[in-house]
Image (cartoon, helix red, strand yellow):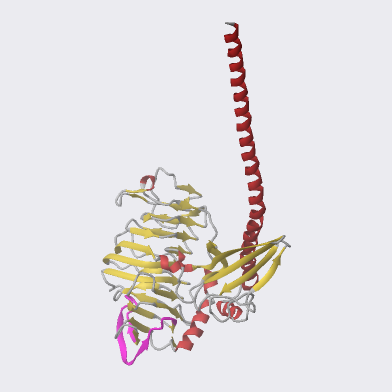
């Protein structure tokens, strides 16, 4: 019996010893793993730091070049900007092969951390975009790390808005706008906007003679005998368009925001005229203007006729001059300048970027559309048309009942729209492009005159390919970033 108890105690002691040994072994394994984890991460961090530094140095190269451009290009005209790019600026790929050799690349040290090598692909003719390739190089001990970033810089174009206005605006309920909208004044909008609607004001004095509706949003109020309203508002109850079954401001409203300076457009006509003269497409004043028919008598051509007489009340052409009609090739990238009024219609051929400008020293020259459609042969991005008028861009009274306009339209001192004619009823106007108007625009009226349905669709291709020599902002912004 005693022997059995002794064996039991020995067995228990042996079991405890095995448990202790197992616990110690497991602890040793865990400790060894922890040591290995810490050591491996220390080694990883040692290698990681130069890589991160190389990335930061490469990014610094991009931001340096953006500063360099702002320092050298701020306040310059388009012709002066072109001279800058032809003056051998830092780090530019001069031979156009898409790479920079040691004689082209710009190399600079960055605060003793590393070195960046910058190669710049300059903007093509009439383009607002450039590419920067910056390689960051960091040496640490016997290790050298490199990292490359590639960034696209672009000037903001006036053709980036579906509607851009330098005045108080009012668009009635038959209007649908797909694209950004900004007005420097106040905006009463009774249509449907799919993108953000912004104003440079917080409130404004209501300019029309009718009384704003007493809507539950309390958008308007009386002050000193006049109506005042919020900068962006609608007559629809709760901002909901009951006819289209949609919110009026689908993406919301923003105000106040920075105003757009329409005065900066004035210098661009001189550049367009000079460029058109080089192409043989600048036309001096003769009689009452020119009719430009794109795609006539065949694709790739344009027929340009002298307008001897037009009806000043309806903007219709009364008489042309067949003897002075000429046929010109449409340049794949180019501009047409007319000193006087211009009537435009037809089809812009594929792979064509064209700007038509109208200016006059005697009176604000106009561009008149609508006798026939003005459309692109291709809407996938190969076509871009800019209509740029010193005065109004108008639709003629006898314009098509269902009218299509594919173009970015800008009026420097006038407006884009349609005159009020009594007993004038049209069905639909569809604009694919963009509108920038100095004065209040509109193709229809609350009385029902003009176009009953108005669809304005922003052409997203204008972001990358605005019409040649269309006005742009002065600052390059980064709109695409790639880490390599």
Q: Nearer the viewer, residue 13 or 22?
A: 13
* In the displayed structure image, the side of residue 434 where residue 113 appears, left or right: right
Residue 312: give x, y in percent of width and height: 35, 78
Q: Is residue 244 magenta?
A: no
Q: Nearer the viewer, residue 202 or 277?
A: 277
Figure disc tally = 0
Please report the residue visible at 62 percent of the width from the left and 32 percent of the height from the top: 25
Q: Nearer the viewer, residue 254 or 339?
A: 254
Q: Is residue 311 magenta?
A: yes
Mark yes or no: residue 156 visible: yes
Toward the bottom, the furthest residue is: 323
Magenta stretch: give its range: 307-335
The answer to whether residue 347 is above or below residue 322 is: above
Quarter of the figure that contains the C terminus: bottom right
Please report the residue visible at 42 percent of the width from the left and 44 percent of the height from the top: 217
Please report the residue visible at 48 percent of the width from the left and 88 percent of the height from the top: 278
The answer to whether residue 29 is above or below residue 276 is: above
Mark yes or no: residue 227 visible: no
Residue 241: give x, y in percent of width and height: 34, 50
Residue 174: give x, y in percent of width and height: 32, 58
Give the main secondary structure, helix, strand or loop, of the magenta stretch: strand
Quarter of the figure that contains the N terminus: top right
């Amino acid at each position: 019996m005693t022997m059995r108890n002794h064996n039991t105690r020995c067995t228990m002691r042996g079991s405890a010893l095995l448990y202790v040994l197992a616990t110690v072994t497991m602890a040793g394994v865990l400790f060894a793993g922890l040591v290995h984890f810490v050591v491996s991460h220390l080694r990883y961090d040692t290698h990681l730091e130069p890589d991160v530094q190389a990335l930061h140095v490469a990014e610094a190269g991009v931001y340096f070049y953006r500063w360099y451009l702002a320092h050298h290009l701020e306040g310059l005209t388009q012709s002066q900007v072109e001279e800058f790019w032809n003056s051998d600026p830092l780090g530019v790929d001069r031979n156009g092969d898409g790479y920079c050799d040691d004689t082209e690349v710009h190399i600079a040290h960055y605060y003793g951390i590393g070195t960046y090598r910058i190669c710049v692909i300059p903007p093509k003719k009439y383009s607002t975009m450039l590419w920067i390739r910056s390689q960051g190089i960091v040496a640490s001990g016997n290790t050298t790390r490199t990292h490359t970033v590639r960034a696209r810089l672009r000037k903001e174009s006036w053709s980036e808005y579906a509607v851009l206005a330098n005045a108080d605006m009012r668009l009635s309920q038959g209007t649908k706008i797909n694209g950004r909208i900004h007005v420097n004044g106040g905006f009463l909008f009774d249509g449907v906007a799919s993108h953000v609607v912004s104003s440079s004001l917080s409130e404004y004095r209501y300019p029309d003679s009718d009384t704003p509706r007493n809507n539950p949003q309390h958008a308007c109020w009386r002050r000193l005998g006049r109506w005042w309203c919020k900068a962006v508002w609608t007559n629809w109850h709760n901002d909901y368009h009951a006819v289209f079954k949609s919110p009026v401001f689908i993406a919301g409203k923003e105000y106040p925001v920075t105003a757009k300076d329409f005065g900066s457009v004035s210098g661009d006509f001189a550049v367009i005229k000079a460029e058109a003269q080089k192409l043989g497409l600048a036309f001096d004043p003769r009689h009452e203007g020119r009719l430009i028919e794109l795609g006539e008598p065949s694709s790739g051509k344009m027929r340009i006729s002298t307008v001897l007489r037009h009806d000043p009340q309806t903007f219709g052409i009364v008489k042309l001059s067949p003897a002075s009609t000429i046929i010109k090739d449409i340049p794949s990238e180019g501009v047409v300048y007319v000193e006087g009024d211009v009537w435009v219609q037809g089809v812009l051929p594929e792979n064509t970027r064209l700007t038509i400008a109208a200016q006059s020293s005697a009176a604000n020259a106009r561009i008149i559309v609508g006798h026939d459609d003005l459309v692109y042969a291709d809407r996938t991005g190969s076509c871009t048309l800019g209509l740029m008028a010193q005065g109004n861009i108008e639709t003629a009274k006898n314009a098509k009942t269902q009218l299509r306009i594919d173009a970015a339209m800008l009026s420097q001192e006038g407006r884009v729209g349609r005159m009020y004619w009594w007993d004038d009823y049209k069905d639909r106007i569809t604009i694919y492009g963009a509108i920038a108007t100095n004065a209040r625009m509109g193709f229809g009226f609350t009385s029902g005159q003009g176009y009953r349905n108005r669809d304005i669709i922003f052409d997203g291709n204008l972001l990358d390919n605005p019409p040649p020599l269309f006005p742009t902002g002065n600052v390059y912004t980064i709109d695409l970033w790639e880490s390599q």
